[in-house]
Amino acid sequence: MPSPFPGMDPYLEGYLWPDVHNALAAKIRQVLTPLLRPRYTARLSVYVVEDTTPESDLGVMYPDVEVMRAQRPAETSATATEPLRREARTTTPAAVTIPMLLPVEVQIPNVEIRDTARNQLVTSIEIISPVNKREPGLSAYRRKRQRLYQAGVHLLELDLLRRGMRPIFHATLPETPYLIALTRAQTATTDVWPLRLHDPLPIVPVPLLPPDDDVVLDLGLALREVYDEAAYDLSIDYQQDPPPPPLSAEERTWLNQLRQRM
């Protein structure tokens, strides 16, 4: 069964997201390769970051991490050793015991377009991860964007997550749940596709080296094929609410209408 959503499916933004991220990167490489050869190749590149604030995604992307456990008062008491028996006192038991949350290692795949003659990085296609949309990962990703721009690399960014802060900020950008952005090398502008919940994903250009023309990437088709190949419909109950953040009143109305047509 295909996804009932015309564009990004918000139900993919929870624990399924790591699988979606990996599969979408591989699918983008697959669909671009015939358009790029023989002068260019599409390669998967994986970089590893530490999610030092995993509590932001507990129950969403990390559903199995225990957050806190209530402790019964009877489980905690002070037991004095024999030499200090006369000074021992009963301590007040802690109301809650919480585990120490250690950093989570996150592998983030992206797609690199390289020329075959010199193996030069021409275009980077970044699928934004949750760790890229909150600190300290947000600042680290923004520094990466700056390095790519200074190196003369085209940057296509796919922000298909509603939660977190966008790496791109500008006062004129509308408040939409999703955003596609293309920054061409050696230009001072970024082309932006703001996307609402009911908008189809766009067909976007993927720039190459001059004088070669852009190739096109049909993001909607890529995501539909990923959804079908992974059979995500078997893991989703569309009668439940999607993962956080909560939908707006307008989005909820639209979702209820969509459910009636399913």
Image (spheres, helix red, strand yellow):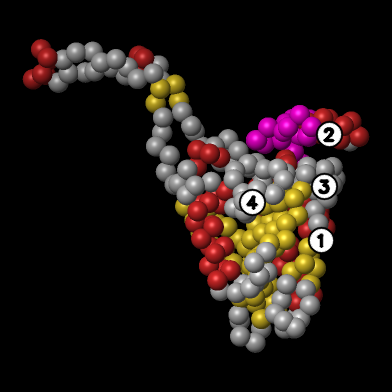
| Residue 248 located within the stretch drawn in magenta | yes
Residue assigned mark 2? 254
Mark 4 closeness class: few <14, some 14–19, many ≥20 residues within 10 Å: few
Depth check, front residue: 247 or 230: 247
The kind of residue on which mark 2 rests is: Trp
For the residues labelled 4 and 2, the Cα–Cα distance comes to 27 Å
In front: mark 3 or mark 4? 4
What's the magenta region? 231-251
Assess whether mark 2 and mark 1 are in contact (beta carbons under 8 angstroms). Answer: no
Q: CA distance from mark 1 to mark 2?
A: 24 Å
| Residue, far left | 83
Residue that mark 1 sits on: 203
Q: Residue at x 57, y 62 (%)?
A: 145
Label 3 – label 4 distance at C-alpha: 21 Å
Q: Position of residue 179 (x, y in %)?
A: 71, 51
Dot 1 falls on a residue whose secondary structure is strand
Q: Which residue is mark 4?
A: 170
Image quarter in which the N terminus is found: top right
Q: How far apart are the alpha carbons under marks 4 and 1?
A: 23 Å
Residue beneath disc 3: 199
**Secondary element type, mark 4:** loop
**Residue at point 58% right, 35% down?**
59
The mark lying in front, picked from 4 and 2, is 4
Residue 257 visible in the displayed image: yes
Amino acid type, callout 1: Ile
